[in-house]
Amino acid sequence: MRGGTSKGVFLHARDLPQPGAERDRLLLGIMGSPDPMQIDGMGGTYSSTSKVVVVEPGPGGAIRYWFAQVGVDRAIVDWSGNCGNLTTAVAPFAIDEGLVPALGPLTRVRLVNGNTGVEIEADVETLDGRAMTSGRLAIAGVPGTGSPVVTRYLDPSGGVLGRLLPTGNAVDRLPSSDGGAVRASIVDAAHPYVFVGADAVGIDGSRTVAELDADGALLDRVERIRAAASVLVGAAADADDATRSAPATPRIILVSAGDDGADVTATAFSMGRVHRALPMTGALCLAAAATIPGTVVDEVAAVRPMHRDGRIRIRHPQGVTEVVVEQRHGSDPIRSLGVIRTARRLMEGRVYPREGN
């Protein structure tokens, strides 16, 4: 399935071993990891195409799903968070697989993400009992147009680390590779992210994704900051453990001022590489961070979401993504985070993992 700007293998939980080492070995074999080319599996050499979603019927008519980020050149299967892009494809998959019925021209599916416990409402256009794929919605990073899928993440704060600001601070200082410290905001909404000003690591917007991804010193500098954030929130014992065992908790995004078409600019990193677009959970979390006074995102964003009907526009390497934030009063100010994407089934059939997996 393609969901947004990501692509992954969708599997029924009933067809897999129980969660644990045996399931992880199987997923590595299916994706062809560890191998930079993933030549002997279904992976596509980038973090955005090395993903698995496991789906099953959930309580009360909901659909429960788990997301796995599978390492490309490392034997890692990370279940610590969610993928917002592939979440877009869960409801269409469930409808087409007969796990939930299609009800009229618009079917609402209640999803529960098993990784984080966050509940999501997904609205899918349906026709003749199946999810529609053709439509007029264009999204940055995907050629052509498709049928819109609306997802709303309900009460998304603290799904992984327990609260919206895991450290209790809008800004923390994290050690960097040059012996100094950088200002950073750690936020957990839809998935934990650490946000750092792009200028703090020497990015000025003039370099392409390929140039950034080829800069080993930059990748190391960014990973050291991310690893320090992982240790600070208790996801890892030390920096080495963070890189080895918690490569996606938190993920990291560098932010800078926007332009005429966007309120903020984002450069995301995933599994030690520069992301070709923007993880959807990153867009959601960034939008939440923009509502919190004093965060790094709030400082660079041109406008807070509440000043534009809850909307924030985020520039990334493939274009602009818009997120809608619904707020409320109280200790948890985020009622929901919403986004519109497209999804499509690319193929269905059998996969043959390497022997020994």
Image: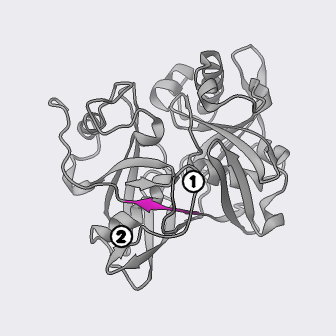
Q: Quadrant of the C terminus?
A: top left
Identify whether 281 is placed above or below 207: below
Residue extending furthest toward the top: 179
The residue located at (80%, 66%) in the rendering is 308
Magenta stretch encompasses residue 315: no
Query: Disc 2 vs disc 1: which is toward the camera?
Result: 1
Whole-number angstrom distance, CA of label 2 to CA of label 1: 21 Å
The kind of residue tagged 2 is Pro
Write down the residue under mark 1. Answer: 190
- The answer to which of 243 and 172 lies nearer the viewer is 243
Left/right placement of residue 317 relative to residue 10 reads: right
Magenta stretch, residue numbers: 340-344
Q: Is residue 240 above or below residue 142?
A: above
Q: Earlier in the sequence, mark 2 or mark 1?
A: 2
Query: Residue 95 at x, y = what percent?
Result: 34, 71
Identity of the residue drawn at 26% across and 30% down: 40
For mark 2, what is the residue?
Answer: 59
Q: Quadrant of the N terminus?
A: bottom left
Amino acid found under the numbered disc labelled 1: Ala
- Furthest-front residue in this view: 144
Position of 181 with respect to 7 (left or right) is: right
Q: Main secondary structure of the magenta part?
A: strand
